[in-house]
Amino acid sequence: MDAGLPVVTAERYAGERQPDGVVWSDHETAMTELLDHVRAQGARRPALIASDTTADWALTLQRTYARWCAGHRVRPLLRKAPFGASPQVLRGVVGTLLAGAPRTDAIVCAADGAAAAVLPEIRSTGRAVGEDLLLASCVDSLAMRTAEPPITSIELKPRHMGADCARLLCELLSGAAPRGTTRTLPIDLVVRASTAA
């Protein structure tokens, strides 16, 4: 952005200088819907495995989880993993969580692929995903759809996001959109067997 060229960001930018355009999704509403869903399925002690980044998306998920827990009088079980953590690191985080909080009955993983990566650790504790422990992801992917059981996820529509960002940049360059334009990309909760308690 220091080059003075038009910039469009996917999601909000937390820096001082703001982009010329933003395409964002309402992660607060989607996360609330996901947490309400696992509660409706019987979960009373949901945990969040969050990314340790300071990106707007990661911080929004953490704030929403904390607010949801306060609203339902639930003690937050927030654990963080480094951005891009290996499956071994993610399994270690979940193993430590379940050892320290054995009454955890739902785990929501923020990072892409994390929910599928922790399935072996959950099984090693004798838990059955979709039965006595619910599992969900804040990012849908092929790994979520093909896991056993398939994992409930938030579909972020990354291809649509990229296309919308490119379209907005073209509109800014041509003068068809004013500087400071913000657009919203709808996202969806996709319920699968991992939360069908």
Image (cartoon, rainbow, N blue to C red):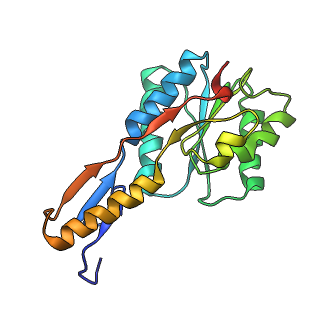
The C terminus, quarter of image: top right
In the shown orientation, is residue 87 left or right of residue 59? right
Residue 153 appears in the rendering: yes
- Name of the residue lying farthest toward the bottom: 3
Give the image location of residue 167, x and y in percent.
29, 63
Q: Nearer the viewer, residue 71 or 108?
A: 108
Depth check, front residue: 116 or 87? 116
In the image, 49 versus 151, the foreground residue is 151
Could you tell me which residue is drawn at 50 percent across and 30 percent down? 34
Residue 178 quadrant: bottom left
Residue 17 is at least partly visible in this image: no
Closest to the observer: 75 or 112? Answer: 112
Q: Position of residue 133 (x, y in %)?
A: 71, 26
- Above or below for 92 versus 82: above
Q: Locate residue 71, reporting x and y percent.
A: 42, 22
Q: Residue at x 52, y 23 (%)?
A: 37
Q: Is residue 70 above or below residue 63?
A: above
The image quadrant where one finds the N terminus is bottom left
**Residue at x 76% of width, y 36% of height:** 148
Q: Give the x, y percent position of residue 55.
A: 44, 57
Q: How many marks?
A: 0
> Could you tell whether 182 is left or right of 106 in the image?
left
Question: In the picture shown, does residue 141 fall above or below 127?
Answer: below
- Left or right: 189 in relation to 85: left
Which residue does the image show at 45% across and 28% down from the upper left?
Answer: 33
